[in-house]
Amino acid sequence: MRVLLCLVSWVLLCCCWIAQAEIFTSIGQMTDLLYTEKELVRSLREYIKAEESKLAEVRSWARKLDDLTRISTSDPEGYLAHPVNAYKLMKRLNTEWSQLESLVLQNPSDGFISNMTVHRQYFPDAEDETGAAKALMRLQDTYHLDSEDFSKGRLPGMHSNAMLTVDDCFDMGKTAYNDGDYYHGVLWMQQSLKQLDAGEEAVVSKAAILDYLSYSVYQMGDLPRAIELTRRLVAIEPSHQRAGGNLRYFEKLLLKEQKEERQEEEQTNQPASEEPIQLGTYVRPRDHLPEREIYEALCRGEGVRMTEARRSRLFCHYQDGSRNPRLLLKPMKEEDEWDSPHIVRYLEALSDYEIEKIKEMAKPRLARATVRDPKTGVLTTANYRVSKSAWLEEEDGPVIARVNQRIQDITGLTVDTAELLQVANYGVGGQYEPHFDFSRKDEPDAFKRLGTGNRVATFLNYMSDVEAGGATVFPDFGAVIQPKKGTAVFWYNLFKSGEGDYRTRHAACPVLVGSKWVSNKWIHERGQEFLRPCGLTEVD
């Protein structure tokens, strides 16, 4: 409105200036003024139209977001359980709300900006949006999901209307591209192009998609297809800054390769493969994790299966902690999950009330989960552990003291020297890649600061069911343990001799659908000397 008043004042001022110049003495000149006024009115109409268009756009945003928040807040955890919804929330708050802010700032609204300023401190940033995008790619790799399945909301065992638009897919591909991850860049740019060609509306242009896609395909070593895509780009936008140069460079490289391979001249213009780019077209580059394929296969439910002979040696029974008084009247239900190394699951290890109280105490303290640096012993974040965690001690509430006591009663080990109860929440794509809980011989200072020796055992509570993904897997021997709310699993990380059991290297699979809550107690060596005496051999 202030801009409108300024414009009207400017029009009136111009008219006054013209009158003072005595233009009215000439009808011809006055006629010109009529046309000037008409032009000013036209400009005024355009201004009003622009304001109305902006207001209509803001109304459209409001309607869309109103519908979206009505659905999302009716069941927050259920809504965020779908990884696409979680990614789009990150993107929406980091990118799209900023676009809305810029739109409104064209005619500043003090109330809106004040509200944005207050809430911006809680918004995800660019790093969060990038992390959410990488989480989707991690799920794509682990569970062999095609980009189109993700884009259309099709996940194993479920179908949702949580879909990715052309622009969403383009941003996914751009995230990968900017990270030098051309493998995923190709998959998502191809999906973006496919949806655009199918007639879906988008902000991003076809030329922009082809630009990223052609170069990513080149980086994957597919020169014929890179040339074909670049030719399509040149056909759409002949004056493109890079396309012409790239095309000449790609064709020169292909000619050189064919010459070196002594191929026949007529093969110089060998057409690119007509097969569409999809999952499996290109080989995913290897990374730092040697057991990546085994780990991901176990997460998908593939891989090693326990033989019937070994399965016959697994039992379930009541465990009273060697006649512990607190377990005599209500012993724990214990089930063998694996025979060697021995892994057991305890049923009804936590009540629903205890789970909710632990989550209630942990939520305000949740921060990016850390790992202990093997060289310094200092806790630090790591890309291979993606979750948020909090540490709870007995002073935080009677529930923690009760849980600690129960762990001590069940295991027969003292928790006086154990670490605090760690609570972790794994959201979209949350995982913990294969790792050891204990420190190896080349990491002598890992737990030096604690002064309680190595981690002798792990007690892991599952505090939620997970709709898909999130299993605990042991790549060395193939155990797959599914999370089940209220249960707990326990295993020894060290032999009785104090030597590490390297078979216990394990991982938390990425959460595909759902929210995974766990709490764990790492029990240390000190204080266990008479509770778990040394064996006769190194591997007892």
Image: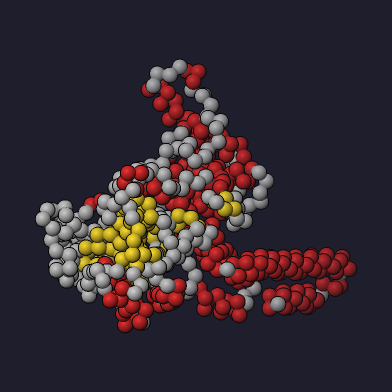
Residue 306 lies left or right of residue 41; in this view the side is left
Q: Which colour assignment does the render follow?
A: secondary structure
- Tell me which residue sits at (48%, 67%) in the image: 124
Q: Which quadrant would residue 374 be assigned to in this image? A: bottom left
Is residue 460 shown to the viewer in this render? no
Screen quadrant of the N terminus: bottom right
Residue 32 lies left or right of residue 14; in this view the side is right
- Tell me which residue sits at (48%, 22%) in the image: 268
Screen quadrant of the C terminus: bottom left
Residue 344 percent across, percent down from the top left: 32, 59
Image height of 403 relative to 286, above or below? below
Residue 366 lies left or right of residue 406; in this view the side is right
- Tell me which residue sits at (68%, 78%) in the image: 2
- Residue 539 or residue 392, whichever sits in front: 539
Residue 34 percent across, percent down from the top left: 84, 68
- Tell me which residue sits at (67%, 46%) in the image: 199
Image height of 535 relative to 363, above or below? above
